[in-house]
Image (cartoon, helix red, strand yellow):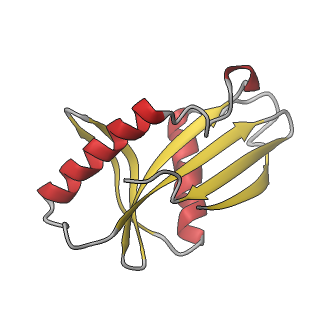
Amino acid sequence: MSDSITHLPAVSAGSRLSGREAENLACRHLRARGLQLVTRNFLCRRGEIDLIMRHGEYFVFVEVRLRNNPRFGSGTESVDHRKQKKIIIAAQYYIQLHRLDQAPARFDVVAIRQGKDRLELQWIQNAFPS
C-alpha cells in the first residue's frame, strides 16, 4: 500500500466542496500523476465506482471520500469492510462486462478533507485487497 498526502489551497473562503467537485479534484490529481481516466460514476445494481482509471497495465477502481467535519471520522476510515465489499463486487461486474479478466486490478482511495484555508488530499494506492 502506497500513501501520499497533498495540501492544496481551499477552493474559496467559506465555500464547501460538493461530492462532484471532490471527484473532479481527485481525477485531476490522479491524471497529473500519470493515470488515465476510463470512466466516471460506473453504476450497477451492486454498487457504484467513482472513478475507473488505467495506471500502466492496471485498472484502478477509485473511491473518492470527502470529509468536511472530522467528528465523523476520516474519509479513509469511512471505507469500511462493507463498503470495500460493495466496491469489489461492482468492480468484478465491470471486469466481467468488459471482458477484462486478464488485466490486473487494484483499489485506491482518495480522501479529501476540507479545512478553513486548505484542502488535504490523501491518495492511498492499493488501499484494500480484492
Residue at the far bottom: name it. 56
Is residue 42 visible from the viewing direction of this image?
A: no
Picture quadrant where residue 32 is located:
bottom right
Work out whether residue 46 or residue 12 is closer to the camera in this orientation and state it. Answer: 46
Whole-percent x and y of residue 31? Answer: 53, 68
Residue drawn at x 58%, y 49% as measured from the top left = 110
Whole-percent x and y of residue 25? Answer: 59, 51
Residue at the far right: name it. 117
Drawn side of residue 15 relative to residue 1, left or right? right
Work out whether residue 97 or residue 1 is closer to the camera in this orientation and state it. Answer: 1
Whole-percent x and y of residue 47? Answer: 29, 35
Q: How many marks?
A: 0
Name the quadrant of the N terminus. Answer: bottom right
Q: Is 24 located above or below residue 104 in the figure?
A: above
Whole-percent x and y of residue 79? Answer: 52, 36
Residue drawn at x 62%, y 36% as measured from the top left = 75
Residue drawn at x 61%, y 34% as measured from the top left = 77
Q: Is 70 located above or below residue 109 in the figure?
A: above
Is residue 52 visible from the viewing direction of this image?
A: yes
Picture quadrant where residue 101 is located:
bottom left
Drawn side of residue 79 relative to residue 51, left or right? right
Picture quadrant where residue 61 is located:
bottom left
